[in-house]
Amino acid sequence: MNPIAVFETTDGIIELELFKDIMPITAGNFEKLVSEGFYDGVKFHRVIDGFMIQGGDPNTKTPNVLTYGTGGPGYAIADEHIKSDLLTNVRGTI
């Protein structure tokens, strides 16, 4: 069974299933950032109604909206998505 990450937002709960068996680097990095509190207090900085939301940028903890969408943890990880044909960008993909 895959772990489930639960986000509490002002508009309700969002649950994410982490596919650690298929995307171990991505899922492990996400769990690491969560355990460090990286996402605590961040905002969804881009919302397109009925289509998608974007969030996770630590810059959204500041009032400088010009930097929203440009922040990150300060490092990059390998793109595992290209290694798997099991996952696609269908509704619900993170």
Image: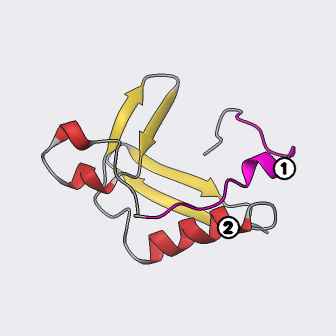
Q: Is residue 43 left or right of residue 55?
A: left
> Residue beneath label 2, please?
25
Magenta-drawn stretch contains 83? yes
Q: How is the image coloured?
A: secondary structure
Q: Is residue 55 above or below residue 5?
A: above
Q: Residue 55 location, x and y as percent? A: 40, 45
Range shown magenta:
75-89
Q: Is residue 46 above or below residue 93?
A: above
> Residue beneath label 1, please?
84
Amino acid type assigned to the residue bearing label 2 in the image: Ile
Going 84% across and 49% down the picture, which residue do you hit?
Answer: 84
Q: Residue 34 location, x and y as percent? A: 46, 70
> Which residue occupies the foreground of this view, 42 or 66?
66
Going 86% across and 46% down the picture, which residue do you hit?
Answer: 86
Q: Residue 38 location, x and y as percent? A: 37, 67
> Which residue occupies the foreground of this view, 17 or 67?
67
**Is the magenta region chiefly helix, strand or loop?**
loop
SS at mark 1 in the image: loop
Quadrant in which the N terminus appears: bottom right
Q: Residue 12 location, x and y as percent? A: 41, 47
Cα distance in 3D space between marks 1 and 2: 13 Å
Mark 1 neighbour density, 10 Å: few (under 14) some (14–19) many (20 or more): few
User: Can you tell which quarter of the image residue 49 is in?
Assistant: top left
Amino acid type assigned to the residue bearing label 1 in the image: Ser
Q: Is residue 88 visible?
A: yes
User: Can you tell which quarter of the image residue 37 is in?
Assistant: bottom left
Q: Is residue 3 visible?
A: no
Q: Is residue 11 above or below residue 73?
A: above
Going 50% across and 22% down the picture, which residue do you hit?
Answer: 50
> Which residue occupies the foreground of this view, 54 or 17?
54
